[in-house]
């Protein structure tokens, strides 16, 4: 299943637990934060000043 930028971080982690390693490699330590259950990957990327497309490319490189 493909991960999309409008999925919450929590959803992505349930679908693909290794997403934690990838998100952390971008400096997104928010994976354990309670707001991760309601915050989308795109929202988290914006908060952290990251390129969501680059993150999505890495996340889906291994899940497709």
Image (cartoon, rainbow, N blue to C red):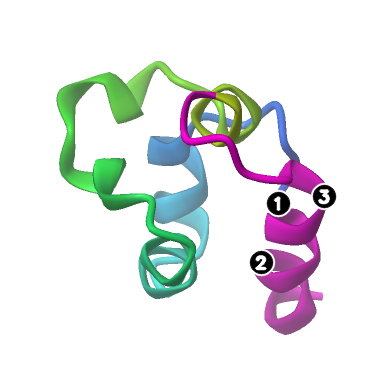
Residue 18: image quadrant is bottom left
Q: Foreground mark, 1 or 2?
A: 2
> Which of the two labelled residues, at mark 3 and mark 2, occupies the earlier sequence position?
3
Q: Which residue is mark 2?
A: 59
Label 3 residue SS: helix
Q: Are marks 3 and 2 in contact (CB under 8 Å)?
A: no
**Range of the magenta residues?**
47-64
Q: Residues within 10 Å of mark 3 (few under 14, many from 20)?
A: few
**Label 3, label 2: how far apart the Cα atoms are:** 10 Å
**Residue drawn 68% across and 57% down?**
55
Q: State whether residue 45 appears in this view.
A: yes
Return the residue nearer the eye: 29 or 61: 29
Q: State whether residue 2 appears in this view.
A: no
Q: Which residue is mark 3?
A: 53
Q: Which residue is mark 1?
A: 3
Q: Are marks 1 and 2 in contact (CB under 8 Å)?
A: yes
Residue 14 percent across, percent down from the top left:
40, 52
């Amino acid at each position: 299943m493909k991960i999309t930028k409008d999925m919450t971080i929590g959803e992505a982690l349930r679908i693909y637990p290794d997403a934690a390693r990838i998100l952390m490699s971008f400096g997104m330590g928010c994976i354990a934060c309670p707001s991760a259950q309601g915050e989308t990957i795109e929202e988290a990327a914006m908060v952290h000043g990251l390129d969501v497309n680059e993150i999505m490319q890495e996340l889906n490189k291994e899940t497709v």
